[in-house]
């Protein structure tokens, strides 16, 4: 698991049908006596309907693929997947679940408890077609994962569990959210779900930090961020190539109320995690403070390992942060501009004896990666991601040095230019063998000083690049 602390200035060291029948019978009976009772019963029926509309028991779960297989396909780290239900299961409480739609020997994944949110973590189960009864000594929120089924699996919770506030973008309104929060004042957790994200947080944090108690703008912001990072990763919901299709999984953002010592926010197999301490969770829930922290940690879940060598784990992650920042906050200067990172990068570039791997400042180092985006455009990194996904597994570089050399070579392939002069300027040293491989591509050699580029003053390569097909 990657445990990465997000610090100031963005630097990282290491969040009833039966009832209706009864009501009909009661109304018919009392109508014979008095209209006042009828009106009273009608009001009660409306209140019951308002309360129960937030309490889901049935779920349709499309296949998402196994999280390990999805990670291998995208060449990134593993991220667990689950579909939230808004149902809390008490310790040792039995919950019965009816499952239909599975084929053959396929199983449905289920969890009680949320990793990182619950101190003891979640307990995992595999459910079969028909009736299943499960329980956990620790209790927790109920979730499902259709990682084996080939189609949509239908699930119904027939017994056990209690509802918590569960807001779904596109289904509920601000007024619904307020009603949920009022109805369940002692909820052990709350969940918010958008098209692409699920947030699991404490009720206290949600009440304290969600601006105007309206989750809609917040969830839209998460969806926008994820869509931008999908695009930079060369992933699309409409891609005809399965290798480059966006995953159907939900990206997890979790509050850790247990506050592990020294941790602020971090990313790992269980998603992006925000601690309650230091107001980390505030930036996760206050839409006006949505920023670098979420974008950076979400970026860690995107990094492709074949071109993430040890020296750039906290560096190339920020191409995802920068892409999201530019899209979500248009017209504003990027982090590299606001914090003087370009100025420090240009001071480094003036040196005569340069060695990229010895740069200690991750924001100087990321300038090199971002200048490739500025020079070769919005298709550069999507195409680089696609190239690495298309490589056979046995052709993927494994050692740090192999990853560096492969990155230099593949950069030239994607740019359709000999980009060696750029890496020479940055002191990322190409081996003699890599130089021969790049030169054998017979692409025109870069002549424009793209290493002088900033967001405000980009430097484009020679016309030869723009003329490529």
Image: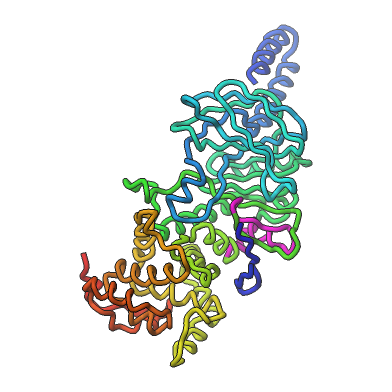
Q: How many marks?
A: 0
Identity of the residue drawn at 56% across and 31% down: 59
Q: Is residue 392 above or below residue 291?
A: above
Q: Which quadrant of the figure contains the C terminus?
A: bottom left
Asked whether the viewer can see residue 322, the reply is: no
Relative side of 452 to 336, left or right:
left
User: Which residue occupies the foreground of this view, 68 or 11?
Assistant: 68
- Determine the image quadrant of residue 427: bottom left
User: Is residue 24 located in the magenta-colored stretch of the structure?
Assistant: no
Q: Position of residue 432 (x, y in %)?
A: 33, 79
Identity of the residue drawn at 38% across and 68% down: 406
User: Which residue occupies the foreground of this view, 146 or 104?
Assistant: 104
User: Which residue occupies the foreground of this view, 434 or 459?
Assistant: 434
Identity of the residue drawn at 65% across and 61% down: 265
Identity of the residue drawn at 47% across and 66% down: 399
Q: Position of residue 25 (x, y in %)?
A: 68, 10
Relative side of 228 to 216, left or right:
left
- Determine the image quadrant of residue 297: bottom right
Q: Position of residue 209 (x, y in %)?
A: 69, 56
- Determine the image quadrant of residue 368: bottom left
Q: Is residue 225 above or below residue 421?
A: above
Q: Which residues are magenta?
A: 269-291
Asked whether the viewer can see residue 66, the reply is: yes
Q: Position of residue 28 (x, y in %)?
A: 67, 9
Relative side of 101 to 290, left or right:
left
Colouring scheme applied when the structure was drawn: rainbow
Q: Is residue 198 above or below residue 385?
A: above
Q: Is residue 354 above or below residue 305?
A: below
Relative side of 375 to 445, left or right:
right
User: Which residue occupies the foreground of this view, 299 or 37?
Assistant: 299
User: Is residue 285 located in the magenta-colored stretch of the structure?
Assistant: yes
Q: Which quadrant of the figure contains the N terminus?
A: bottom right
């Amino acid at each position: 698991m990657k445990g990465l602390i997000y610090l100031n200035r963005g630097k990282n060291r290491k969040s009833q049908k039966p009832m209706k029948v009864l009501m009909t019978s009661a109304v018919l009976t009392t109508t014979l006596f008095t209209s006042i009772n009828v009106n009273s019963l009608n009001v009660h029926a409306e209140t019951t309907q308002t309360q129960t509309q937030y309490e889901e028991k049935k779920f349709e779960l499309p296949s998402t693929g196994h999280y390990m297989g999805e990670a291998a396909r995208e060449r990134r780290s593993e991220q667990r997947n689950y579909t939230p239900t808004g149902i809390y299961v008490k310790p040792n409480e039995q919950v019965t679940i009816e499952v239909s739609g599975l084929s053959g020997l396929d199983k449905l994944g289920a969890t009680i408890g949320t990793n990182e949110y619950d101190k003891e973590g979640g307990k995992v189960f595999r459910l079969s077609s028909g009736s299943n009864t499960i329980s956990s000594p620790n209790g927790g929120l109920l979730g499902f994962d259709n990682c084996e089924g080939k189609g949509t699996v239908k699930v119904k919770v027939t017994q056990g569990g209690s509802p918590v506030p569960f807001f779904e973008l596109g289904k509920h309104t601000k007024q619904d959210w307020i009603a949920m929060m009022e109805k369940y004042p002692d909820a052990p957790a709350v969940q918010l779900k958008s098209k692409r994200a699920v947030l699991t947080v404490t009720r206290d944090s949600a009440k304290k930090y969600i601006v105007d108690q309206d989750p809609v703008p917040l969830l839209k912001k998460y969806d926008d961020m994820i869509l931008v990072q999908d695009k930079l990763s060369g992933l699309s919901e409409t891609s005809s190539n399965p290798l480059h299709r966006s995953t159907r999984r939900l990206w997890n953002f979790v509050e850790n109320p247990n506050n592990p010592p020294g941790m602020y926010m971090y990313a790992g197999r269980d998603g992006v995690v925000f601690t309650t301490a230091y107001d980390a969770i505030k930036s996760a829930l206050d839409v006006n403070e949505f920023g670098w922290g979420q974008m950076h940690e979400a970026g860690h879940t995107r990094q492709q390992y074949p071109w993430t060598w040890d020296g750039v784990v906290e560096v190339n992650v920020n191409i995802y942060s920068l892409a999201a920042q530019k899209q979500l906050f248009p017209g504003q200067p990027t982090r590299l501009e606001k914090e003087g990172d370009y100025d420090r990068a240009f001071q480094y570039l003036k040196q005569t004896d340069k060695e990229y791997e010895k740069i200690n400042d991750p924001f100087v180092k990321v300038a090199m990666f971002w200048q490739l985006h500025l020079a070769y455009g919005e298709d550069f990194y999507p195409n680089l991601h696609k190239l690495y996904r298309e490589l056979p597994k046995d052709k993927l570089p494994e050692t740090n040095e192999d990853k560096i050399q492969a990155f230099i070579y593949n950069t030239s392939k994607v740019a359709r230019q000999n980009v060696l002069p750029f890496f020479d300027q940055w002191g990322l040293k190409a081996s003699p063998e890599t130089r021969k491989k790049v030169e054998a591509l017979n692409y025109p050699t870069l002549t424009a000083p793209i290493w002088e580029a900033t967001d405000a003053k980009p430097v484009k390569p020679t016309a030869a690049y723009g003329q490529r097909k």
